[in-house]
Amino acid sequence: MCPDGFYRNLPPLRSRLKFNRRDVLSTLGGAASFAANWSIPARAEVQGGITFGLNPLFLETDIALLRLMQLYLQQRLMRPVSLVRRRTYQEITALLLTGQLDVAWVCDDPYVQHEDAMELLAVPVYQHQPLYRTLVVANKATPARVFDDIQGTVHAFSDPDSTSGYLVTRYELALRHTTPADFFREFFFTYAHRNVVRAVNARLADSGSVDGYVWDVLQQREPALTENIRVVFQSEFLGFPPIVGLKAARDPSLNAAISAAFLDMDRYPLGRQLLAALALDGFTTAKPELYHATLTKWRFVKAQV
Amino acid sequence: MAQTSVLSAPRTWPLTLRVPLLAAFLVIAVAVGISSFVLERFQADQEASLSLLANAYMDGLTEAVRSATIRKDVWETFDVLDNARRHYSGLAPRYTIVLLPNDTVLAATDPVRFPVRSLIDANMRTYFPAKDGLRLDGVSGNALITRRIREEGLVGGTILSEIDISTLLRARNILLASLVAFNGILALAAAVIGYVSIKRMLSPLDILSDHVEQARIGQVKPIASTMGRIQAPEFSRLFDRFNAMATAMREREMLTAQLAAQESQVVLGRVAATMAHEVNNPLGGLFNALNTLRRHGADVEARDASLHLLERGMIHIKDIVRSMLAVHRPQADSEPLTHEDIDDLRLLIAPQLNRRKLAVEWTNRLTYPIPVNAASVRQIALNLLLNAITSASENGLVRFCAYNDGSALYLLVADDGRGFDASKRAELESMVILPPSPGAGLGHWIVKRLVQENNGLIQVDPANHCLSEIQIMLPFRSSSGLRNESEATESTQL
């Protein structure tokens, strides 16, 4: 069940005992543990453990889901796992690249920017393929029906390093030889896809750029947030945000163990529970070419800037 | 008109109205005072509580949005405002706006009304306090708060918040309505209790008033002793005094009646004496005539002269006797007054007139029997004539006239005497019969009683000429009037 070498990398007994005690405390601590993980540097917090960075792709309120992920990974990896979250993608990317995180679930945009340093460990499978779309949405109170109709509106982006929450829309504007500052009357960042939807729903913004996967989940779980919003643009399929480690990892076997934990998640009850919570089919391996379209867009935009 | 004068003079209102109104007014005055105090305190407490809540709300909000406002972060500012609105249960903000220093909207809880980066309306800006603070707008039911976001002494933005205080105002209005209703009921109860109490307390006055009224019309009777015992001591004493007065009046009335009877006897005596004198004068001639007849009866001439003298003397005596009989004969009340009844009086007063050498102008225009109490009329006319003869000047004039107009009999008696002073005139014309003044004659008092018994009227000097004159008007009576009059006379005699 577990990948070879996984047990070889187990820490000494003392560390294991310490891990068990901390694990229990962490389990009992629940949300309080997350609060700590949000602000304390991962490496200092978990000696001998694993630090896992998460970008705000997740529904920010879904603490139970994160707790489930932590339990699953600890169960599979037999060591403490700290989930580290930051407000921006850039912070998570910086923590990973500087070695303060062992592994991270990043957006495809940061991945294509730092492909040379990052190793693809697993890619989510959503609706039977490791792909998703970017959506541009507008409040139904606006007359916007297609992308060009959102010109002059107040627009909500998710994150400057998000493919779906910024890059794709930015790319579409670059194709039109314009920029957000010129195209929109006003724009701002919400640093979460769910917040983009909230902003458009509340008419704080007339339009917004949002992840298609998050949009689908919100439509199912919080229809009140989406019922006043229409989709005015959707991109082609892009590679789903991956789970990456560092190519220059201190312990290469750890990358393999983490990759295995994600890839055979559907074989474990807790894993299936986690997949259901994430609304994913599972995880798979992928080659960097999966993100070619994202890379092309990023380069195009970068060239314009 | 009369209503206006009553309204304009509350002192003329009855006590049963004034006291309850005063009680109600006092209750209302006290209630208004207490209500104002309670409402002011309630309002002050509400405002203090609101101020504390609002300050706590704004303190938390200011700290939460400070960083985002300085960074001009639209979403984070909105997120804070949105969460505060949903999670702060102490207040009910209608909307909250965060403005940048140039008065453009950074974020608002109502982005549709206040879009991002839009310039806030000048009227809206003046709607809120210019400086940090809270202002209540009772008309719209809102509290308006302004709070500046300061960072290192510089203003980085401003928070404007409109708080719904309609709940507080509703609570205040409910309190006011409760106070008004409660105090209104209290005032009404005080008025009703006051009315009933005063009505009961003053009920002895009604009893007293009834008895005084009865006394006024000559039916004095004491208040039953059982009534006095159940009243307050003040009224009990008053009843005792009234009863003492009533007893004295009744005794006086009885004495007066006795005096009147004696006066009648005196009048009768005077008349009898006069009549005796009148009879005595011809008696001397008659005896002379008898002697002449006895001595010279054979002489035809002397006999005829004596017989003629005897006849005249006898006729004179017959007239006097007839008039006396006419005046004093028993007569039924229902018998009408005739022309002769009046003329007989002239015979009756003739000796008095002669003794005072008075001229008389006698007018009797009664041509048919008049339906009035003849006995009363003769009594009235005789008393008035005797008084006039007494009042007239020496060798003066007495005038008498009797006539009717088809509905009433009129008697006019005048003399050339001194006439009546104002008090005597008022007393005669008044409907109130007071006991006769000590030392005064009873003639007028009897006249007045008889006139009232016959529902008549007395007027003094109606023609205003040189003679002093009394005019009596006695309405013709009906059969029921006769019965009533008969009862009245009976009660007077009792």
Image: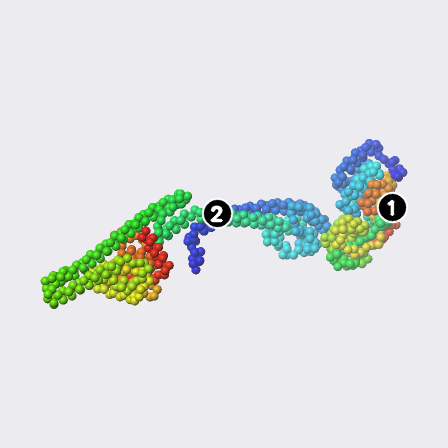
Q: Secondary structure at mark 2?
A: helix
Q: How many marks?
A: 2
Locate residue B60: give its quadrant: top right
| Chain for numbered disc 1 | A
Front residue of A47/B34: it is B34
Q: Amino acid at mark 1?
A: Thr
Front residue of B349/B20: it is B349
Left or right of residue B299: residue A139: right
Residue at mark 1 to residue at mark 2: CA–CA distance: 94 Å
Note whether B382 is above or below B148 in the view shown.
below
Left or right of residue B79: residue B276: left
Q: Amino acid at mark 2?
A: Ile
View extreme (bottom): residue: B301
**Residue assigned mark 1:** A284
Note whether B475 is above or below A60 in the view shown.
below
**Residue assigned mark 2:** B193
| Chain for numbered disc 2 | B
Q: Tell me residue A24's x, y (percent).
A: 78, 35
Q: Tell me residue B234's x, y (percent).
A: 39, 44
Residue at image position (64%, 49%) is B147
